Amino acid sequence: MIKVAIAGARGKMGMEAVHTVMKREGMKLVSVLDYKEVGTTLAELDAFPNTYEVPIFTDFAQLVEETKPDVLVDLTNPHSVYTHTKQALELNVRPVIGTTGFTDEQLTELKELAARKKIGAIIAPNFAIGAILMMKFAREAAKYLPDVEIIEMHHDKKLDAPSGTGVKTAQMIAEVRHEKIQGHPDEKETHEGARGAEFEGMRIHSVRLPGLVAHQQVLFGGEGQLLTIRHDSLTRESFMSGVAFCIETVIGMESLVYGLENII
Ligand SMILES: NC(=O)C1=CN([C@@H]2O[C@H](COP(=O)(O)OP(=O)(O)OC[C@H]3O[C@@H](n4cnc5c(N)ncnc54)[C@H](OP(=O)(O)O)[C@@H]3O)[C@@H](O)[C@H]2O)C=CC1
Ligand SMILES: O=C(O)C1=N[C@H](C(=O)O)C[C@H](O)C1
């Protein structure tokens, strides 16, 4: 039985993850990490009325001491995720991280820490299998069509831009794409930001609108042709088989993996 703790259980993803872990055979939700006093167990919260008698902690060291989780699933926000991941590794709890917004320096540091401690960790900018395939197909297409722009579209409560998936897509494309600055060499923005975020000569555009969940198009332009690779997460259920897969997989790992494309 894999013992799981979740940080961010009151959030949109966290709520789904709580139900996923509770329903899945072979794993058990032993505790929840919050940053404010919201109650002593999940059953006291409006989101889970009288349902799960799972204790809530505001102190991670105490959570580990009292409930001894094997895995910490983090679905919080870009401001707290780095600290949670580091604390988990230091306390020998395997992190499964869905939260986005890490800097390159933070990723490198966490990778080194996991390697030093020989502890499995997964940082997954996107848990949905369709999104992983979208990124893999985009990497393949970029070998032949190096002119590419990424348009990611999310709900308007999202804190980080570009999305973790948008950045990961650009990183995967950059692995194979001949370096190239796109657009006209003399192009000039008359309104700042018009051309989107720059990533190794590619552009990432972030759309935020109510009604959206998580969507991305990768556009490749060629002579007289356009290839569009698109993925849509229509509900947060789309991420849950990935969350369960990571919890089960991280147990047998001894290093940090960034991106599910490396382990599926
Ligand atoms: N990898 C993937 O496939 C996916 C990743 N995500 C990412 O997951 C993260 C969460 O997304 P989402 O559920 O939509 O966001 P929400 O804002 O709905 O949920 C975040 C929750 O975390 C809580 N929280 C904030 N800080 C802490 C902390 N220090 N400790 C414990 N809980 C905390 C928030 O509480 P409060 O509201 O009181 O501040 C909130 O309840 C985001 O980074 C998002 O990008 C989202 C979807 C898929
Ligand atoms: O905030 C979200 O909602 C999502 N965040 C992740 C990201 O930044 O890529 C994954 C998915 O796109 C949903």
Image (cartoon, rainbow, N blue to C red):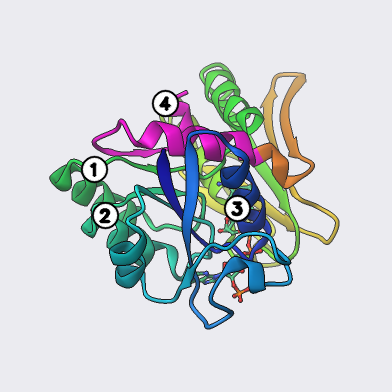
Query: Which of marks 1 and 3 precedes in the sequence?
Result: 3
Mark before the other along the chain sequence, 4 or 3: 3
Residue occupied by mark 2 = 89
> Which residue range is magenta in the image?
239-264
Residue at screen point 32% across, 56% down: 68
Residue 198 shows in this picture = yes
Seen in the picture, residue 133 relative to 259 is either above or below; the reply is above
Q: Which residue in the protein does label 4 denote?
A: 263
Camera-near label (4 vs 1) is: 1
In space, the residues marked 4 and 3 are separated at their CA atoms by 23 Å
Please name which of the two marks, 4 or 3, marks the residue nearer to the observer. 3
Q: Secondary structure at mark 3?
A: helix
Mark 3 to mark 1: distance in Å?
A: 24 Å
Q: Is residue 176 above or below residue 172?
A: above
Query: Which amino acid lies under the numbered mark 3 shown in the image of this protein?
Result: Val
Residue placed under numbered mark 3 in the picture: 18
- Which image quadrant for residue 228? top right
Q: Residues within 10 Å of mark 2 (few under 14, many from 20)?
A: many
Q: At 48% from the left edge and 40% from the top edge, which residue is drawn?
A: 27
Task: State whether residue 3 is above or below residue 244.
Answer: below
Q: Mark 1 and mark 2: span between their CA atoms?
A: 7 Å
Where residue 259 appears, as percent x and y from the top left, is 45, 37
For the residue labelled by badge 1, is the local secondary structure a helix, a strand or a loop? loop
Q: Quadrant of residue 41?
A: bottom right
Label 1 within 8 A of ligand 1 by Cβ: no
Q: Is residue 257 above or below residue 199?
A: above
